[in-house]
Image (spheres, helix red, strand yellow):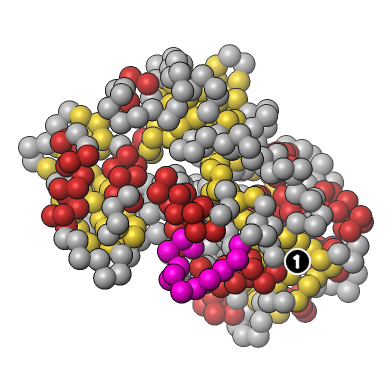
C-alpha cells in the first residue's frame, strides 16, 4: 500500500500535536496532513499523478516534507535532488528521471530554466517569491485529495547515487522498501520512537538517511520532526539544548564538529536519549571525544541508498564500538570472496592491528532483504553487476570490504574502490585514518592512494590541523611510521584548510586523488 498511510494513521491519532517544528513555528499533524492533500490535489489539477516523477530541489524546509508526502499521496514518484547541484547535475537528473514538476527555491530556478528545454518539466513551484511558474502556497489546491492506491512494489522514490565514480544512477525504491526500513530502523532505539520524541532533522532530506530515518520514521510514529536547512554545529547544539531534543541521527563529520566546539561554548545535550552515526565509517577517536564531552552514548549503524538505507545497527545496550552492528531482523548479510564463497567469522571483533592478516578474513559485504531496491532505473548492465542470485535470495553487492565475528557483529574495513595496493600489499585507508585521528594535532583527515612508479601506488594523507597546532607534516609521518607497518604509513602528508565533503559528510576522495 501507499506508504503515506502510516502518516495518515499518525495524523488521525495525534491531531493537534506538533508534526513539524521549524524556526520556532509548530505545524500540527492535522494541519500537515491537510497540506499534503492540497499539494496532491495541486498535482492532479495539472494532470500529474500515478507514476509521474516530481523533483524536490530544496534544503530541509517544511515544504520539502509536504511536497514529499503530497507527491506520494497523489501516486507520484519523488525525485529528491541536492540543492547544491547546478545545471550540469540537473541536466542529467531531470532528463534521466523525466520529472514533470520541480519544487525549489527562487534562487535555484535559474539552474532549472537553463536545462528546462531538454527535459519534460511542465511546472516549477517556488518556495518564496521570485522566478518560477507558481509559488508553493498558490500551487496548493483548495480541496484535498485522497490517498492514491499504490501496490507495495510500485516505485515511491527515485534518489540518485552520488556519482563519485561515474554518472549518477537512479535508485528504484518501492513503497514497501521505504516503509519497511522506516519502521525497522527504529528498533535499535529503546521503545522505538515515542510520540513524545523530538528528532533533530539536520541530515539532508534529499539523502536517503535523512529521508527514512529522521523524517519518515518520526512521522510514522507520531513524534515531532525539527528540520534544520544547513549544518552548523553551534546552531544544532543550541537547538538540541533549547528544544530538549531526544533523538539525533547524524554523520561522523557532524559529531566531530560538535566534539570540537570551542571549550568556552557550554551546551547541555543531556536530553538526548539515543544518538546514532551513519553515512560513513565512525572513527573511534570521534566517538570517544563526543561521548566524553557530552556524556551521550553514540551508536553506529550502516546502510546505503540502495537499501533504503539501514541494514545494520548497534542497539542500545548491545553496542560494539568499532562495529556497524548486527543486521536488522529480516535482513540477511554475508561476507564473500570474489567467487561468492562465504568468509568464516572471526571469534570476536574488532580484531587488533597485526593480530591477523585482514586479507584472510575480509571480503565484500552483500545483503538481501525487504529493503533492497528493485534495481537501477533503466540500467540493466549495472543491475547485472549489482546482484547475485544464490540460495534463493537476491544479494546486493555493497562494495564494502568487511568481516564479521561469531557474535554476529559486522565490521567495515573500507570501500572496495578505496583500497590502496602498494608494492603488492593492500592498505585500507580507514585503518590509517583511525590512527591519524588519535594525533592531538589532527582535526580531520583523509587517506588516498596516489600513483608511484616503483610501488604502483603510495599512501598520502591530507590533514586539517587543529588551530594553533605546531606539528609538521614530517611529525605526522613519523607518528604513523612508529605505529603502523612501514608499507602502511603515509609517505606524503599535506596540510589543508578543509577536506572536500558531500553535504552528507562523506569525503570526496576523487578530488584528493586528482590534486596536483
Tell me the quarter of the picture where residue 374 sits.
top right
Q: Is residue 268 magenta?
A: yes
What x and y, as percent, mark residue 305? 55, 45
Task: Confirm whether residue 377 shows in the render.
Answer: no
Residue carrying label 1: 20
Q: Looking at the image, which is closer to me, 356 or 364?
A: 356
What x and y, as percent, mark residue 174? 69, 42
Q: Looking at the image, which is closer to me, 305 or 506?
A: 506
What x and y, as percent, mark residue 36? 81, 64
Q: Quadrant of the N terminus?
A: top right
At a point 49% along the width and 73% down the height, the residue shown is: 265
What x and y, as percent, mark residue 446? 31, 52
Q: From this viewpoint, which residue is outermost toward the left?
A: 454
Vertical arrangement, residue 394 with respect to residue 502, above or below? above
Vertical arrangement, residue 36 with respect to residue 250, above or below? below
Query: Which segment is the magenta one?
Result: 258-269
Identify the secondary structure beneath mark 1. strand
Q: Is residue 284 magenta?
A: no
Vertical arrangement, residue 293 with respect to residue 321, above or below? below
Task: Confirm whether residue 279 shows in the render.
Answer: yes
378 to the left or right of 515: right
14 to the left or right of 275: right
At a point 60% along the width and 72% down the height, the residue shown is: 238
460 to the left or right of 440: left
Tell me the quarter of the picture where residue 63 sits.
bottom right
At a point 54% along the width and 58% down the height, the residue shown is: 294
Q: Taken as a whole, is the magenta stretch helix, strand or loop?
A: loop
Q: Looking at the image, which is closer to me, 40 or 280?
A: 280
At a point 34% along the width and 60% down the height, the residue shown is: 443
Q: Residues within 10 Å of mark 1 (few under 14, many from 20)?
A: many
Amino acid at each position: 500500500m501507499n506508504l503515506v498511510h502510516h502518516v495518515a494513521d499518525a495524523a488521525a491519532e495525534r491531531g493537534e500535536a506538533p508534526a513539524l517544528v521549524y524556526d520556532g513555528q509548530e505545524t500540527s499533524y492535522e494541519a500537515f496532513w491537510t497540506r499534503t492533500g492540497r499539494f496532491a490535489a495541486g498535482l492532479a489539477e495539472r494532470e500529474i499523478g500515478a507514476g509521474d516523477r516530481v523533483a524536490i530541489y530544496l534544503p530541509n524546509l517544511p515544504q520539502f516534507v509536504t511536497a514529499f508526502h503530497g507527491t506520494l499521496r497523489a501516486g507520484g514518484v519523488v525525485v529528491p535532488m541536492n540543492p547544491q547541484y547546478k545545471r550540469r547535475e540537473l541536466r542529467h537528473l531531470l532528463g534521466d528521471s523525466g520529472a514533470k514538476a520541480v519544487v525549489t527555491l527562487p534562487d535555484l530556478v535559474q539552474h532549472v530554466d537553463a536545462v528546462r528545454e531538454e527535459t519534460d518539466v511542465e511546472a516549477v513551484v517556488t518556495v518564496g517569491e521570485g522566478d518560477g511558474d507558481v509559488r508553493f502556497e498558490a500551487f496548493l489546491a483548495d480541496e484535498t485529495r485522497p490517498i492514491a492506491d499504490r501496490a507495495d512494489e510500485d516505485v515511491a522514490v527515485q534518489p540518485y547515487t552520488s556519482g563519485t565514480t561515474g554518472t549518477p544512477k537512479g535508485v528504484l525504491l518501492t513503497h514497501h522498501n521505504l516503509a519497511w526500513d522506516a519502521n525497522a530502523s527504529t528498533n535499535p532505539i529503546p521503545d522505538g520512537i515515542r510520540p513524545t520524541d523530538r528528532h533533530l532533522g539536520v541530515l539532508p532530506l534529499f539523502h536517503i538517511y535523512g529521508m527514512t530515518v529522521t523524517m519518515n520514521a518520526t512521522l510514522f510514529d507520531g513524534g515531532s520532526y525539527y528540520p534544520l536547512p544547513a549544518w552548523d554545529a553551534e546552531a544544532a547544539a543550541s537547538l538540541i539544548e533549547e528544544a530538549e531534543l531526544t533523538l539525533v541521527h547524524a554523520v561522523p563529520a557532524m559529531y566531530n564538529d560538535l566534539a570540537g566546539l570551542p571549550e568556552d561554548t557550554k551546551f547541555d545535550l543531556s536530553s538526548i536519549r539515543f544518538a546514532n552515526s551513519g553515512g560513513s565509517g565512525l572513527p573511534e577517536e570521534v566517538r570517544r571525544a563526543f561521548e566524553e564531552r557530552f556524556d551521550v552514548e553514540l551508536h553506529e549503524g550502516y546502510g546505503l541508498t540502495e537499501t533504503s538505507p539501514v541494514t545494520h545497527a548497534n542497539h542500545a545496550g548491545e553496542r560494539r564500538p568499532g562495529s556497524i552492528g548486527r543486521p536488522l531482523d529480516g535482513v540477511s548479510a554475508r561476507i564473500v570472496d570474489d567467487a561468492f564463497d562465504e568468509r568464516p567469522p572471526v571469534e570476536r571483533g574488532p580484531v587488533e592491528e597485526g593480530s591477523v592478516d585482514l586479507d584472510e578474513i575480509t571480503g565484500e559485504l552483500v545483503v538481501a532483504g525487504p529493503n533492497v531496491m528493485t534495481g537501477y532505473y533503466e540500467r540493466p548492465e549495472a543491475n547485472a553487476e549489482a546482484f547475485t542470485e544464490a540460495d534463493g535470495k537476491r544479494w546486493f553487492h555493497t562494495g564494502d570490504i568487511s568481516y564479521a565475528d561469531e557474535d554476529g557483529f559486522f565490521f567495515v574495513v573500507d570501500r572496495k574502490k578505496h583500497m590502496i595496493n602498494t608494492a603488492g600489499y593492500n592498505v585500507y585507508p580507514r585503518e590509517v585514518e583511525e590512527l591519524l585521528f588519535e594525533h592531538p594535532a589532527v582535526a580531520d583527515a583523509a587517506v588516498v592512494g596516489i600513483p608511484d612508479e616503483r610501488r604502483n601506488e603510495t599512501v598520502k594523507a591530507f590533514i586539517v590541523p587543529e588551530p594553533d597546532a605546531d606539528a609538521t607534516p614530517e611529525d605526522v609521518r613519523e607518528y604513523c611510521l612508529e605505529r603502523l607497518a612501514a608499507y602502511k604509513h603515509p609517505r606524503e602528508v599535506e596540510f589543508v584548510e578543509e577536506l572536500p565533503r558531500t553535504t552528507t559528510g562523506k569525503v570526496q576522495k576523487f578530488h584528493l586523488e586528482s590534486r596536483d
